[in-house]
Amino acid sequence: MKSKKKNISMFWMLVFQYACFAGIVLLALGGIGRLLNQLITYSYSDPAFIHGEEIAQYAAAGKESSIPKSWLKGNSWYLLIGTDGTPISGSAGSPENLVLSAEDVSILSIGNGYKGYTEYQQEDGTKTGEYICYRPESTADGNAFSIEGMFLTDVSTGTVTYSTLKEVSAGERISDTLRMVLIGESSGSMISAYSETMKDGADCVVLIGVPKVSMAGENTKADLVIQMYDVILVAAFVLILLLFVLWLSRWFRKPITMLSKAMTEVAEGNVGEQITYHGPAEFTEMCDSFNTMSSRLEKTEQERRQAEQEKQKMLADISHDLKTPITVIEGYARAIRDGVIPESQQEQYLSLIEEKSEQLTGLINEFHTFSKMDHPAYHPDLQKTDLCETVRQYLAGKYPECELAGDTLEADLPEEEIPCMLDTVQLHRALDNIVNNSIRHNKPGILIHASLHREENEAVLILEDNGSGLSDYAREHIFEPFVTGNDARNSKGSGLGMAITKKIIEAEGGTIELLPADDPWKTRFAIHLRTL
């Protein structure tokens, strides 16, 4: 049975699945990338560095006790310095006796964010210090920094050589104390500075120190994460691709496996196997086509078995029909030869032998006609003929026989011409089988009636009689070979007449049917023939 549910085409299903695959890959790689970026950020940064601005705010507000201990783990520290350079408060591990000038504090107070200072060797051998002010910004991915300004110094003299800050101009000198604080020579730390306002409204600077050794170790971890970044992304993509391919393979393999199993069952003779599958339209159509084929094979197999049974029955019936007259002929001939039959009765027995011989010849002729019509090479000699005139001529020739049998034959035929393609000889034979059955299987005195009329593109010929009618068995199997008045086969005739009639009518492009009884007519046949 074909599925009533409308299935999506395989092409659009694959497009949808590929879009889902691409979306999953993008989401997965995006999530992995974001996670790795966070790992790199945290790998590069000590907690005190990450939370430097928050530590500075807590310290300036006098809430040192609220600073989480995890932010100042190890040797990290903070130091609160007033505008005159005097230390006000600090955490354990902060530099002792650190004294900065007001000018040093003013430089540290520039901007409102992280200040970084590094020194590096120039190509000419001189050493340059780089001081950068970073301004914190909030983004969709979290907190970030932008450069607010910078200046460069000649380390050997402490003189500013270049500056983008209005508070510091080229030519000014940076104190050695400030330089030593910024590069961590006095504390062994990487130092950042934040400008804050204390709870009493006074300005201050908060220095945050992170051990250099800790930062170096964290940088090594971060470098390892960076080196693994591409490997992790590629591995994640390959894993997702393999899972998608496995799922897709299972999705394709399911209907193919079902079809293969069902075809194997059919090949082993188990016809009628059906597949229930819902999926892409192409696979559903394949399964539906297989189901249709399987149903037809099952029907064909049933028809083959039925034909085999009918063939066996036909051979048995032929044997029975031939055996009876042959047995009579054989017995009478032996009796005459052996002198058992008196000479005065021999003529009578010879007449019986002749009668049975004629009966045997008739049976053989009918068997031959029936088998000939089943041959593919059989074709009727169709010619354009007036059906009305053909039926009229047949009935006219049948009147004397009906009168001798004590029956009445009536006809109701139109005067107009009804042209059809007919084999007149074969049509007469078909009509003869019907009329002869009415005469032979009924008592004398019945009425046989024939009528003909036209319906659209066909002519309908009805032959009926008011005799005793047919048994239920005969009505059900009337057009099958070797069916007589009852199933005991004790009626006259071979039982091939109506089967031959049906083949003749169908060979001429028509149909024949047994109509229900309609008082007074007990047996009624309708022949439908195409008109021109």
Image: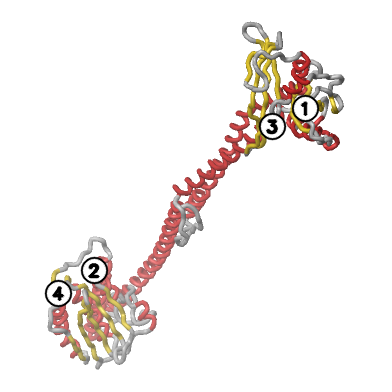
3 or 1: tag closer to the N-terminus: 3
Q: Nearer the viewer, mark 4 or mark 2?
A: 4
Amino acid type, residue under disc 4 in the picture: Pro
Specify the label residue 405 is tagged with.
none
Q: Which circle's residue, 4 or 3, is located before the other in the chain? A: 3
Nearer to me, 184 or 512 = 184
Q: Tell me the element at label 1.
A: strand
* Picture quadrant of residue 338: bottom left
Type of the residue with mark 2: Ala
Q: Earlier in the sequence, mark 3 or mark 2?
A: 3
Q: Quadrant of residue 528?
A: bottom left
Q: Residues within 10 Å of mark 1 (few under 14, many from 20)?
A: many
Q: Secondary structure at mark 4?
A: strand
Q: Which residue is mark 1?
A: 205
Q: Amino acid at mark 1?
A: Val
Q: Amino acid at mark 3?
A: Leu
Distance from the alpha carbon under mark 3 to that under mark 1: 30 Å
Q: Which residue is mark 4?
A: 419
Single out the residue that lies furthest toward the top. 124
Q: Position of residue 103 (x, y in %)?
A: 75, 19
Q: Are marks 1 and 4 in contact (CB under 8 Å)?
A: no
Q: Could you say which disc has been placed on residue 39 in the image?
A: 3
Whole-number angstrom distance, CA of label 1 to CA of label 2? 115 Å
Residue drawn at x 74%, y 25% is 192
Kindly identify which residue carries mark 2.
507
Q: Could you say where residue 529 lies in the image, as x and y percent from the top left?
A: 22, 74
Do the residues under discs 3 and 1 have CB atoms within 8 angstroms? no
Q: Residue at (63%, 26%) from the top-left corner?
A: 147
Between the C-alphas of marks 4 and 2, the distance is: 17 Å
The residue shown at (75%, 14%) is 175
Label 3 element class? helix
- Give SS at disc 2: helix
